[in-house]
Image (spheres, coloured by chain):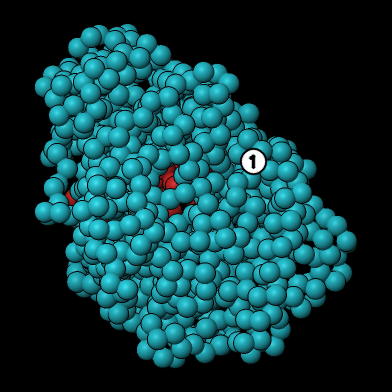
Chain colours: A red, B cyan
Amino acid sequence: MRKNLVAMLTLALMVLAVVGLALAEGNGNARKGKYLYRKSCRGCHAAGGAASDLSPNSHTQAEWKKLFAGWESIKCANEWKALSDEERNDIFTYLHDFAADSPSPAKCS
Amino acid sequence: MPDQSHRRLTRRSFLKAACAGTALAAAAGQTKVLSGLVAEAGAAAAPWQSKFSACDMCFNRCGLIARVENGVVTKLDPNPKFLKSRGMLCAKGNAGIAQLYDPNRLKYPLKRVGARGEGKWQRIGWDEALDLAASKMKEIGEKHTRCGMWFTAGSDLQSQFVTRFAEVYGSFNVTSHESLCLLSNNRAFLDTFGEVPFADVLNSKYILMAGANRFEALVTPDSIDLMTAMREKGAKLVVLDPRYTKTAALADEWYPIRPGTDMAFMLALSHVIITENLYDAAWVAEKTSGLEELAAHVARYNPEWAEAECGVPAADIRRIARELAAAAPEAMVYPGRRSSDYENSTQIRRSFAIVNALLANWDRPGGLLGAREVGLKKPGYDAPWYDDNPPERADAGRAPMMFEEDGSYVLMREAVLSGEPYPVKGWFVFKTNPMQTAPDQGKTRRMIDTLDFMVVVDITMSDTAYLADLILPAPSYLERCDPATALQGSSACACVVQRDPVVPALFESRPVFDILKGLAGRLDLAEFFDFDIETYRAQQLAGLTGAKEALEQDGVYYNPSKVYGIYEGRIYKTLSQRIELFNKRYDQMGLDPLPVYSPPKKGPDKALRLVVGRSAIHTQSSTQDNALLNELEPTNALWLNPADAAGLNVADGEAVEVASSAGKGRLPARVTPDVPPGLVYMATGFGSISPTLTHIHGNGCSIASLLADGYDAISGNAALHETFVTVTRSAS
């Protein structure tokens, strides 16, 4: 089944909240991924945090695919090790499905 | 309009409202009357004040200055520094005072005591009201998972808090009013350009407008800029509309195109532009993908073929295509707004978007613009996770490209009615009125009957509120502290506005933010609402140098961000990362990657197609009980062509019975050649079932009672122009 997924970015730099919808390419649970990302990653990856301010919008879908394929070599790999394969896949699904090149809707305003 | 008449109208309306308020309040046995409250509220204030606000009589949010005399708002003026509205405040905006001092407003929380729809209410206190709502939400969450609650919010600066509440409470089921409005148009442009554009009408030389009525259905600054472009800069406006609208009347050319055939016209434009090589080949090669596929696809859609479908002469289609191309890139097919019309409206609007791509007008003066940077921040929060929730929204899986954060009202209603894929038994509604705006009112009513609990927060007792278990009174925009909001006015500006109370909230009304905060406290979710709007605003504005000061001094902050050329060095948010003439994602999903024409459905014998719209005086059902506006447009009528009227033996002004597969209604006929034979038109709103809406209760007919519940197959947007009706002379 095709899954429609939600994300609300922490920073909306444009007029319209940049939110996305796409196919669940990772086939994980993007909703859960969003929750896990906020819980496990955003402590560091936020404005004023210890690492780069990261959101789905920071990379294209292809870039997220590449990053996740080689996650063991990312600087914070230790943080990722604490997660199960399923959890990592959920986070991937979330980041990938709302990536910079995923379709993003606008509001009626 | 001269100042004098403004004042007269306003003064008279206020006195009238105040008097009526006294009468009604006395009748209702209230302890305090409206005029008393006003005097009390203003007692300590300086005699004369001017305060900035942003209008809320429609979604445009025009900047205004409220003149407050002895604590009473006596006049609303446009904010001359507000570029998005070009310093204008329309009839609706001027009538905002009558919303504030509307004697028919909800005044305190009401609990239903009779049967649903019986109209029997008990006044209760806020604590009891919030305890009741919280306990019902808890109960439903425990029994049916948190997704058993559905949240619906209209277009309001505080609606974001409803979404936030829904998420932290744990429900995925949130719908906005947009699935009854413009989602298919958004879908189409997103799936072509990667975002929803703003039309730079002001700098355009040639505007083709179809499926939009910009001189009546006002959008700022487009409505105003269109007139300026035409009158001062010689821009040409060509309108396609079966109905002779005010926009059609003012256009250079108007074609009464057959309803539901716009795609044929647009495909033929693409055909001409491609076969005659009228496009900027270098630009199209650099920015777009799928030209070859498009060329092959439109080869068969020549103007002669289109003429047979849409009724516009082939020679005119060919000429318009050439003229558009000659004016390009300062030329456009206007994207439009409400596209809740046909079951293939996303594909119809894709055909509009594709012509724009061929005109090479993206990100350029006089063309279609991307969203500019405003720089407002969205304060984040870490919503909890509820493991027992179902995997998806209840309306998921029925429209393949539904917008997750808007959902689909029509599909959600189906899910609630059927109990599939899981039971949804609670409904929280804020300032939107599906009983009046959504197709098939009877179905909405039946759906409501399946609910265990329904709470509505609104300013007046809308038809939707009338069916609730609990009604909570909200203040109008002139009484609230609202978060900052970012607005883009085409090429005019990218700006921020916010609201502070112009006068204190009347009666016992409470903003939805306070209501949600109260509920959060009762549901162990207080940590997600542990702030007030002022601190929230400070977070939103952080890093925007000078914004706070500008808002205080001018009532608006402008970000001087780049207007044109913002896509230089940037990818388009599509699979190919280019403007997609041919949509790759659709292709992968088994949807038509290029718009394929199919003729509109034919109705049964003698049936007439019903189309709906609105005037410049009303915003659907939300403004119709406004005393001032109702005076200007007191009811709606069924527009009927003289040939049809003669066949039905109906004279102008006579009452007619209108019946469809969804229901029936009664309203006066307006016999006019402004609609073609076979087509009838009526304005939205009216025919209210809620007796407290004294101006529109039983007056006219609601579109909701007649429209059938079709939807756009791709986005799930309602399809409001697929209904056929039979009309008969009314017996009485």
Which residue shows up at 26% across the image and 31% down it? Answer: B351
Residue B434 or residue B208, whichever sits in front: B208
Give the residue at x 78% y 43%: B553
Q: Position of residue B456 (x, y in %)?
A: 46, 73
One can see residue B508 in this view = yes
Q: Quadrant of residue B184?
A: top left
Which of the 4 image quarters holds residue B677?
top left
How crowded is the residue under tag 1: few (<14 C-alpha within 10 Å), some, or many (20+)? many
Q: In this view, does B356 lie to the left or right of B714?
A: right
> x, y (%) of residue A16?
48, 42
The answer to whether residue B582 is seen in the rendering is: no
**In the visual, does A44 lie left or right of B582?**
right
Type of amino acid at the residue the image marks with label 1: Met
Q: Mark 1 lies on which chain?
A: B
- Residue at 42% x, 82% y is B469
In-front residue for pair B680/A50: B680
State the residue at coordinates (88%, 61%): B47
Identify residue for label 1: B88
- Identify the element where label 1 is drawn: loop
Residue A61 screen position, x and y as percent: 30, 35
Does B264 sit above or below residue B114? above
State how many labels appear: 1
Q: Nearer the viewer, residue B532 or B332?
A: B332
Q: Camera-side residue: B282 or A23?
A: B282
Residue B273, given in percent of the width and then of the height, sits at 26, 15
